[in-house]
Amino acid sequence: MTNIRICLAGATGWAGSALSRGIFEAPDMELVAAISRSHAGQVLGEAIDIQGLTTPIFATATEALKTKPDVFVEYTKPDVAKFHILSALRSGAHVVVGTSGLSEDDYREIDDVAQEVKRGVLAVGNFALTAVLLQKFAEIAAKYISHWEIIDYAHSDKKDAPSGTARELANRLSKMQESQLDVSLDSIVGPKESRGVRLHGSQIHSVRLPGYIISLDAIFGMPDQKLILRHESGSSAEPYVNGALLAIRKVGTLVGVHRGLDSVMDF
């Protein structure tokens, strides 16, 4: 069987470095190109201290895509992510998206291109299994409980808010129903911002403080009872690797944009 040829954008970052090692060690994958402006021209193994990893690092997606990868993994920043994704699709690659901060309009545009070129895009707000399970459990809860809010925690220098994980959760819950507000936002006494942002029918509060990596609470309330679902990540990027490898293996079976790792998992 031919190995899956992969280009990884953001290969020298916190999560990208761990994924680079995971791809390097996977028996059915080949990391043919890496993208990192700060390490362009180097060999990836030397940049992230993995002996034997000889993947070249390119400064731009345009250069890296000349290696003709089967799958392009986007793990950079929102301001360049859409350009990377569209470029990869038009070059014939399937795409796995680990970058958060893309809007619904962005994904509609990406889906149009993906459908046109008959390629798959698997957009995963969080590759960690506990985050995937939180989203599934929250969908079940939203069928039966009409009141909920989402709290999104991250490190103080994270620019996108809410996080991709929180956005994805709100989008999923909107398929069940919108959360009920007993006091409408227009009836609040005080600043409306104190109630967070209304997104896809959910109230989301984004906390940005030192000490957090990525965490998420989905809080459901009923009279005299409540359900709190929480995902917490630690300082290691390892929880995201296995989920990303699964996404890489599955994205080639898709056409168009698909949201969430669970869309290619058996539950």
Image: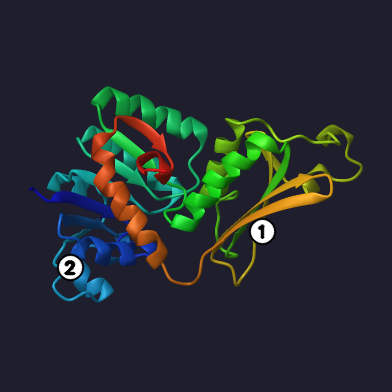
Dot 1: element: strand
Q: Label 1 sits on what residue type?
A: Val
| Helix, strand or loop under label 2 | loop
Residue 168, how many percent across, how many down?
53, 42
Q: Residue at x 25, y 35 (%)?
A: 253
Q: Nearer the viewer, residue 163 or 86?
A: 163
Q: Position of residue 175 (x, y in %)?
A: 57, 30
Which residue does the image show at 34% across and 29% down from the upper left? Answer: 256
Q: Which residue is mark 1?
A: 207
Examine the image and state in which quarter residue 228 appears: bottom right
Q: Residues within 10 Å of mark 1 (few under 14, many from 20)?
A: some
Q: Mark 1 against mark 2, which lies toward the viewer?
A: 1
Q: Measuring from the top left, give residue 188's x and y in whole percent.
A: 88, 39
Query: Which residue matches tag 2?
Result: 43
| Res. 108 image quadrant | top left
**Residue at the location (39% across, 46% down)?**
80
Residue 82 versus residue 13 in the image, above or below? above
- Estimate the spatial distance between the alpha carbons at disc 1 and disc 2, rounded to whole Å: 37 Å
Disc 1 and disc 2 in contact, CB within 8 angstroms: no
Q: Dot 2, how many residues are within 10 Å of its Cα: few (below 14), some (14-19), or many (20+)? A: some
Instruction: From the viewer's perspective, tell me whether residue 229 is left or right of residue 262.
Output: right
206 over 264 or under it: above or below: below
Which of these two is toward me, 259 or 46? 259
Q: Is residue 266 above or below residue 11?
A: above
Residue 6: percent from the left, percent from the top?
A: 20, 51
**Residue appearing at x 68%, y 32% in the figure:** 178
The quadrant in which the C terminus is found is top left
Which residue of the protein is positioned furthest toward the right in this rendering? 189
